[in-house]
Image: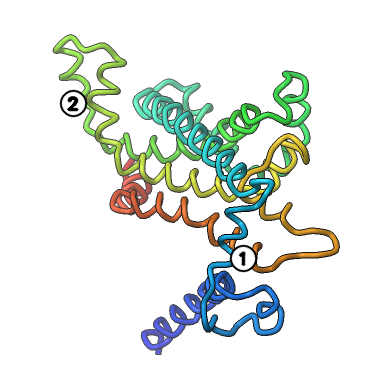
Amino acid sequence: MTTKLRPAAAILASALFAVPLYYVLVNVFKPGDQIAEEPASVPLPPTLTNIHAVLTRPDGLFWVSLANSLLVTLLSILVLTVLSAMLGHYLARSDRRWTKVLTLILLAGLMIPPQVILIPVTEVLRLTGLMATLQGLVLFNVGYYVPFGVFVFTGFIRGVPVELEEAARLDGASRAQVFWRIVFPLLRPATASVLIFLGVWIWNDFIDPLIILGPSQGTTITTGIYRSIGQYQTDLGSVFALMFLATLPVLIFYLALQKQFVKGLTGGATKG
């Protein structure tokens, strides 16, 4: 009986996740008035009016939001990957007592929702002159998400033979050379997992950019969708087109790294 229920449960769960995607896809290629009347109907004939309207907005909302999101996401995940890999390597290879305490502190950071610390963070950013800036948002992302990167890299590095590093040190390599030339190339699966997870989280983040950047200093792709909705009038076609275009970059990013994704998850979860 259990064997028969598993496929049915899997199909039901897939259907629940597919319903929102179906609504977005069919309404992107449908006129705005038809969306309100028949939101679940298939667009016949399909139209690119909504996408064209978003791409040619006079205020350039999509292009500005896209540029800001790309800049914030790329800078954040690059800095996070480097810092997390280096710190994860140190914690995995160190047997000092205080490193275990540091590991517990970092892992405790995974349990704190970002909204809980958002007000103190804004005060710190305001005191340092980074409030309402992209640099401040990047700094917030790095500070909040580095525990996750350290957790993944530490688990994966513990599965890398330490004899490789010892042999390189005997050949005269420095610590930096051992890490970047020997260890880091072996961390591609873990790196892909960190890049995908953090890239998706930062790209889809809404409340943090909305508060840190403020209403007039800039917008990301998620806050751009929010700001395209007016108080008294909403162009549903443009909203669906914005949501569709917002998913394309992160979808392409995931497809480019999917080969290493599962390896990184299993390696970080089972080794060490």
**Residue at x 47%, y 47% (from the top left corner):** 197
Where is residue 194 drawn, in percent x and y? Answer: 42, 42
- Image quadrant in which you'd find residue 81: top left
**Residue at x 31%, y 46% (from the top left corner):** 267
* Amino acid on which disc 2 is placed: Glu
Which disc number belongs to residue 189? Answer: none
Q: Residues within 10 Å of mark 2 (few under 14, many from 20)?
A: few
What's the colour scheme?
A: rainbow
**Residue at x 59%, y 75% (from the top left corner):** 30
Most extreme residue toward the top, as rendered? Answer: 172
Q: 142 or 69, which lies in front?
A: 69
Q: Residues within 10 Å of mark 1 (few under 14, many from 20)?
A: many
Question: Circle 2 — which element?
Answer: helix
Q: Which residue is mark 2?
A: 163
Where is residue 193 drawn, in percent x and y? Answer: 39, 46
- Image quadrant in which you'd find residue 54: bottom right
* Amino acid on which disc 1 is placed: Phe
Is 164 on the left or on the right of 43, as rendered? left
Q: Which residue is mark 1?
A: 240
In primary-sequence order, the first of circles 1 and 2 is 2
Vertical placement of residue 59 versus 236, above or below: above
**C-alpha gap between disc 1 and disc 2:** 54 Å
